[in-house]
Image: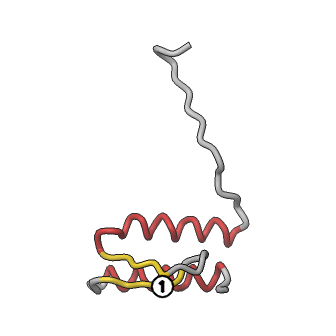
Amino acid sequence: MATVAEMLTQARAAYHALQLGELAVSFKDSNGETVEYNRASLPRLAAYINDLERQAMGAARPHAVQFQTSKGLT
């Protein structure tokens, strides 16, 4: 299984390749599944890169999001 640093390097290379105009790139993710990204999925790939960067820094991924409103709900 690849380390977080290796996955991050692969994801950044995939993002770069898509930015240069390749039609699609694929690599194995943290679950060992092959994931294919194309130009339309650049935002999803960027989010994956951000998640890997958080993991590399040791920051935990938030498990829950809590919303608060000021009007209409009490």
Per the image, label 1 sits on a secondary structure element best described as strand
Q: Which residue lies most toward the front here?
A: 33
Query: Mark 1 belongs to which amino acid?
Result: Phe
Looking at the figure, which quarter contains the C terminus?
top right
Quadrant position of residue 3: bottom right
Name the side, left or right, on which 67 lies relative to 18: right
The color scheme shown is secondary structure
Identify the residue shown where x is 45% and y is 78%. 35
Instruction: State the image coordinates of residue 18 (x, y, percent, origin top left).
Output: 33, 81
Vertical comparison of 58 with 68: above or below: below
Identify the residue shown where x is 57% and y is 79%. 8
Looking at the figure, which quarter contains the N terminus?
bottom right
Instruction: State the image coordinates of residue 70 (x, y, percent, origin top left).
Output: 51, 19
Name the side, left or right, on which 46 lies relative to 20: right
Residue to which mark 1 is pinned: 27
Quadrant position of residue 46: bottom left
Identify the residue shown where x is 48% and y is 81%. 34
The image shows a total of numbered marks equal to 1
Q: Residues within 10 Å of mark 1 (few under 14, many from 20)?
A: some
Instruction: State the image coordinates of residue 49 (x, y, percent, origin top left).
Output: 52, 71
Instruction: State the image coordinates of residue 67 (x, y, percent, origin top left).
Output: 55, 32
Name the side, left or right, on which 53 lies relative to 10: right
Vertical comparison of 55 with 2: above or below: above
Q: Which residue lies most toward the right here?
A: 58
